[in-house]
Image (cartoon, helix red, strand yellow):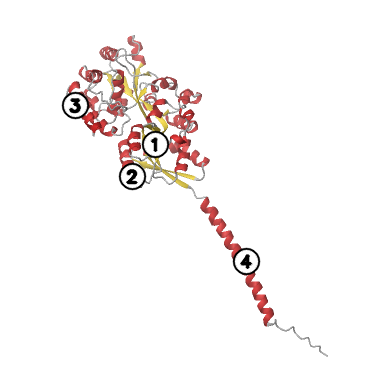
Amino acid sequence: MFSLKVAKPFLSLKSWGQWLVRKRSRIFSVFIGTTIVMLAIAIAVFSQQKVEISVLIQAIEVQQMIESGIVADFEAQNPDIHLNLIESPNASNYVEDLYTSSFLLGDSPYDLVFMDIVWTPKFAAAGWLEDLSPRVSEAELANFLTGDVNGGSYQGKLYRMPFRSDAGMLYYRQDLLEQAGFEPPETYAELIKISKQIQATTDVPWGYLWQGKQYEGLPAMFVEVLEGSGGFWVDPATKEVGLDSPEAIAALEFLTSTINEEVSPPGVTTYQEEEVRRPFQAGEAVFMRNWPYAWSLANGDDSPVQGKIAIKPMVHAPGQNSGACQGGWGFGIAKTTKHPEEAWRVIEYFASAEAQKKFVLKWGYVPSRAALFNDPDIVSKYSHYPELLGIVQKAVLRPPIAQYAQASDILQRYLSSAITGRLSPEQALQTAARETRSLLET
């Protein structure tokens, strides 16, 4: 016989309800757990997003910074920051105009300001920069060249940390002077005398090359001759103008005499740095006023004067001191940045000995940290750096005044009028002094 098994009855309505509640509870728990995990992941991802710090820099220097490795090194040491280097035209006046326009619009896209030393007073006076003084100690600033620190300050506060320095100097053909039996010149008169004799006894056509075009390089060059004559341009403390002093007029008379006596070519009134470097490097001049960058080029393997040149501080009037125009670039923090702490970390790295050394070794720029001039690795590659330190320590600033751009424009116009023969040195500087006083009064 067959046995009949009776199946278990279906769950009761009450049991079914209890099972459903338990099932919903588990589903809800899983949902809540998943949501919490997803939120945690989102928060972690968000917290790991990099802060972007933007800065406008001349295109050529952007590439130099990248190729030197300092940008990659910074980001490796600071994985929470992305450094956005925005390329600008390779003319400093265009860069200044772009920064100025962005600040005048009221909400600059730049967190950092990479600036020429002469922009500091203007940008600081306009309220566009953060005061960096609370962020850096006096002991730390003592590691930098005095001229660089002073050039980054305005009315007793620091607004620009130095990255690389610069200073004008006198290059000369050491071989030609030795052959003619001359020591390097100390005075204006000695430079002219040596130039004329070597011009007369060799096939070197010119004695002295300098920047005479109407642009910022002209007053930069002139402040060296002005210092060497015992004169001054503008006293920033008193706003006194010294352009029409006998010392200033004598300084300009020296420059015009180099043209009138055919020590300098008539075309020098159109020369910038490269128009000066190229003929000197080709062996066509005894002396050249230029910046340190020219050393590596003039000593390149393809240079006719390789190993034949030397440098020294600029010549001066008897009883006066040499002057070297203080140049250089550094970083400030834009007042409008939303990331001042991250921006300061960028500055700290670029101002460090580590970053400056790598940049100098790669490109031959001048460091702003004094100790690096005697760093063994740097000296082994650039043997003239200890001597260069003595030159940059004599550096003088162009007037650190808020109206510097306008004052420079005035001086450029009247220096150009004098060296091209349209006005006498006395007439040119008297007029420049009068217009500069009017500028500072208003």
Residue 176: numbered disc = none
Q: Nearer the viewer, residue 414 or 268?
A: 414
Say few, some or many: other residues with alpha carbon within 10 Å of mark 4 (under 14 / 14 to 19 / 20 or more). Answer: few
Residue 121 vertical placement versus 196 (above, below)? below
Looking at the image, tell me whether mark 3 or mark 1 is earlier in sequence order.
Answer: 1
* Dot 3 amino acid type: Thr
Name the secondary structure under disc 4: helix
Looking at the image, tell me whether mark 4 or mark 2 is earlier in sequence order.
Answer: 4
Q: Which residue is mark 2?
A: 102
Residue 300 in sight here: no
Q: Residue at x 31, y 34 (%)?
A: 402
Q: Position of residue 214 (x, y in %)?
A: 24, 30
Q: Which residue is mark 3?
A: 431
Whole-angstrom CA distance, mark 3 to mark 2, is: 34 Å
Residue 29: numbered disc = 4
Which of labels 3 and 1 is toward the front? 3
Which of labels 3 and 2 is toward the front? 3
Q: Is residue 258 left or right of residue 356?
A: left
Which of labels 1 and 2 is toward the front? 2
Q: Is residue 439 left or right of residue 398?
A: left
Q: Nearer the viewer, residue 221 or 182?
A: 221
Quadrant of the image containing the C terminus: top left
